[in-house]
């Protein structure tokens, strides 16, 4: 086991334990009689205790790739494996957070989170409620369980979305531009909280894969950044980020890493 390299006791990626393996994934969308490639021969691995960021220009296929990893879309060729087993449909080990979360307006925060557990037929109502309460607490929403979405700020709605993902007790958390619709302060706070979930031993989350356009956010959070080309997306670079944590956004090394990542996106 590789125990990294950190000044605040966090575990680094364990490269002996691949969790998600994307192998030669390509996807084409049918358009009239032609087939339009969106992703070409993508391979990447996300390990245990790893935070992976995927970035690239608009339309290069980042969201599509995340949906393939989630088992929501099947690739035209290639495969995605979770602990060595091919993903062919959504799996309970994998939860996803979107840019803006669609909440049911007639349900409270708590009811929205409980609703996310609809497929867990193995759990009773009381158990679902308990898990949801604890997920709301982890997402920083204690005291807002009985509030309706119309009474919540944008950041708080996103927290309900996060609670909904946490309630699923996933091993893998996928996030598609989770902070981009939030103001800077809220986004900053949520970034730190999400990262602490990955490194918190009592959390089930072992691996995070985040799609982002925000280069600073990626350098702050990720252990690895994968840059895709313009459509059709292929991997331009798969870059490790070994800056020590906690990462100071003002340090020389931080700014150098930001510049380097920008250069691949330019
Ligand atoms: N269901 C679909 N049918 C046809 N084309 C699609 C479909 N979904 C996505 N596309 C196309 O595939 C390409 C990749 O889309 P995707 O949403 O994955 O890009 P993205 O990298 O997430 O972009 P953005 O940064 O703007 O969110 C785009 O050109 C898009 O128009
Ligand atoms: Mg997208």
Image: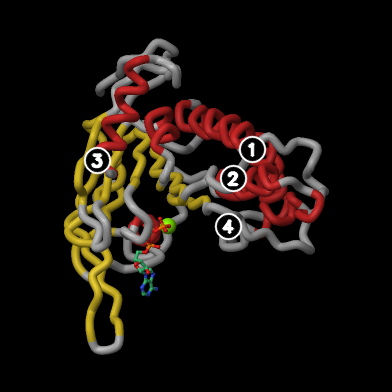
Q: Nearer the viewer, mark 2 or mark 4?
A: 2
The part of the image, by quadrant, that contains residue 49 is top left
Position of residue 7 relative to residue 111, above or below, is: above
Left or right relative to 59: residue 203: right
* Residue 72 located left or right of residue 82: right
Query: Which label is found at residue 61?
Result: none
Give the quadrant of the C terminus.
top left
Residue at the spot of label 3: 264
C-alpha separation, residue under disc 3 versus residue under disc 1:
34 Å
Q: Quadrant of ligand 1?
A: bottom left
User: Which one is nearer the viewer's eye here, 47 or 57?
Assistant: 57
Q: Residue at x 79, y 63 (%)?
A: 106
Q: Is residue 33 visible?
A: yes
The Cα–Cα distance between marks 1 and 4, rounded to whole angstroms, is 24 Å
- Check disc 3: other Cα within 10 Å, few if <14, some if 14-19, many if 20+: few
* Mark 3 C-beta to ligand 1 under 8 Å: no
Which residue position is annotated with label 2?
Answer: 162
Where residue 3 sits in the image (x, y, percent)?
30, 19
Question: Decide: marks 1, 2 in contact (CB < 8 A)?
Answer: yes
- Residue at numbered disc 1: 139
Pointer 2 or 4: first along the chain: 4
Q: Secondary structure at mark 4?
A: loop
Residue at mark 4: C-beta within 8 A of ligand 1: no
Q: Position of residue 158 (x, y in %)?
A: 63, 47
| Residue closer to the observer: 43 or 265 | 265
**Residue drawn at point x = 67 percent, y = 51 percent:** 128
Q: Quadrant of the N terminus?
A: top left
Of badges 3 and 1, nearer the viewer stands 3
- For label 4, the residue is 122
């Amino acid at each position: 086991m590789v125990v990294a390299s950190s000044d605040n006791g966090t575990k680094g990626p364990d490269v002996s334990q691949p969790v998600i393996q994307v192998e030669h994934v390509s996807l084409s969308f049918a358009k009239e009689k032609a087939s339009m490639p969106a992703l070409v021969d993508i391979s990447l691995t996300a390990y245990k205790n790893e935070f992976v960021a995927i970035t690239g220009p608009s339309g290069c296929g980042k969201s599509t790739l995340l949906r393939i990893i989630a088992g929501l879309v099947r690739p035209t060729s290639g495969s995605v494996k979770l602990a060595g087993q091919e993903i062919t449909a959504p799996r309970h080990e994998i939860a996803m957070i979107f840019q803006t979360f669609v909440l049911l307006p007639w349900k409270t925060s708590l009811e929205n989170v409980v609703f996310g557990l609809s497929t867990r037929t193995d759990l009773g109502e009381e158990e679902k409620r308990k898990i949801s309460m604890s997920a709301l607490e982890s997402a920083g929403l204690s005291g807002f369980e009985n509030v309706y979405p119309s009474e919540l700020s944008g950041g708080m709605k996103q927290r309900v979305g996060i609670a909904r993902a946490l309630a699923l007790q996933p091993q893998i958390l996928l996030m598609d531009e989770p902070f981009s619709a939030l103001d800077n302060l809220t986004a900053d706070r949520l970034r730190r909280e999400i990262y602490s979930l990955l490194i918190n031993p009592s959390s089930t989350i072992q691996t995070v894969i985040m799609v982002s356009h925000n280069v600073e956010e990626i350098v702050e959070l990720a252990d690895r950044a994968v840059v895709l080309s313009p459509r059709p997306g292929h991997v331009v670079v798969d870059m490790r980020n070994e800056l020590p944590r906690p990462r100071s956004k003002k340090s020389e090394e931080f700014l150098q890493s930001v510049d380097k990542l920008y250069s691949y996106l330019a």
